[in-house]
Amino acid sequence: MSTTGRGLHGRVLDSLGPSITAGEYPAGSVLRTDELAQRFEVSRSVMREAVRVLESMHLVESRRRVGVTVLPEREWNVYDPQVIRWRLAGCERPRQLRSLTVLRSAVEPVAASLAARHATDEQRAELTACALGMVANSSGHKLDQYLFHDVAFHRVILTASGNEMFARLGDVVAEVLTGRTHHDVMFEDPDPAAVTLHVRLAEAVRARDAVRAESLTREITVGALQELDILAP
């Protein structure tokens, strides 16, 4: 969930969070709450609330008589959707996109195979509807509309797998798909071959063909990596 609209502490987070993930405050940097409150023109209580959110993401650690210390990247909760969003907004975007897409390539084919076995009739119908929505919005520069159906499609795959760990990765996949679109790491119209693969994947899940579902999903993720080679080298 975006911090936008969360009031004053949301405004602080929208500035401070991306600064930390972009490396403007290197690991070990000590931030003084009072100084930050002055800089952002907010009360100490607002600043403490913002720090608590950053602590929950493991970006910082707060200690009495020390201050707020920026933690090394290895400590960050890199699965937090907001952390992903901040990192995609920074100079490390290509590396972050590739890292997330490699994660997808490891998880989604297995999830698709399980979805073909375990999806309910309602989930199979929803997946087909999402694929048709992708087709309907795949031309005419309608990337936002396409994105809506693309995100929903992959959420259904992960949820229909029946594995709660895979299902929780829905927000991660949503962030990488959204980040690619909003940061122009997409062609003006989606690759027709990729759109067709999604339709065929929906058909495989509907037919309960686990082997084909896994194979098609591998093709989708390989294609996504190849697009990054071109658009975000």
Image (cartoon, rainbow, N blue to C red):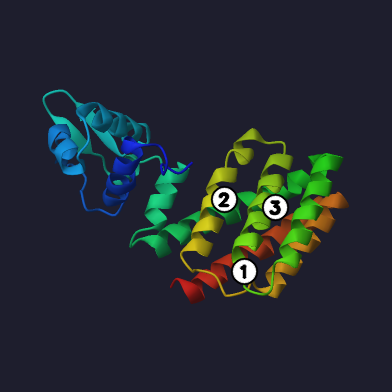
Name the kind of residue labelled 2 in the image: Ala
User: Could you give the CA–CA distance between mark 1 and mark 2, rounded to whole angstroms?
Assistant: 17 Å
Secondary structure type for disc 1: helix
Depth check, front residue: 165 or 171: 171
Q: Quadrant of the C terminus?
A: bottom left
Image: 87 above or below 171? below
Picture residue at 71% right of the left edge, 73% below the top:
193
Task: Please tell me in which quadrant of the rendered image residue 34 appears.
Answer: top left
Instruction: Name the disc covering residue 174, or none.
Output: 2
Label 3: how many Cα within 10 Å (few below 14, some 14–19, many 20+): many
Give how far across and how far down residue 47 sits, in percent: 24, 32
Instruction: Name the residue rendered at 22%, 53% in the picture.
Output: 24
Q: Is residue 79 something one can see in this rendering?
A: no
Counting from the top left corner in percent of width and height, residue 132 is at 79, 60
Percent position (x, y) of residue 61? Answer: 25, 32
Q: Is residue 157 left or right of residue 83?
A: right
For residue 10, above or below residue 23? above
Is tag 2's residue or tag 3's residue first in the polypeptide sequence? 3
Q: Residue visible at 22% across and 29% down?
A: 62
Task: Tell me: 7 left or right of 103.
Answer: left
Specify the amino acid type for callout 1.
Answer: Gly
Q: Secondary structure at mark 2?
A: helix
The label nearer to you, 3 versus 1, is 3
Residues 187 and 117: in front is: 187
Q: Which residue is mark 1?
A: 223
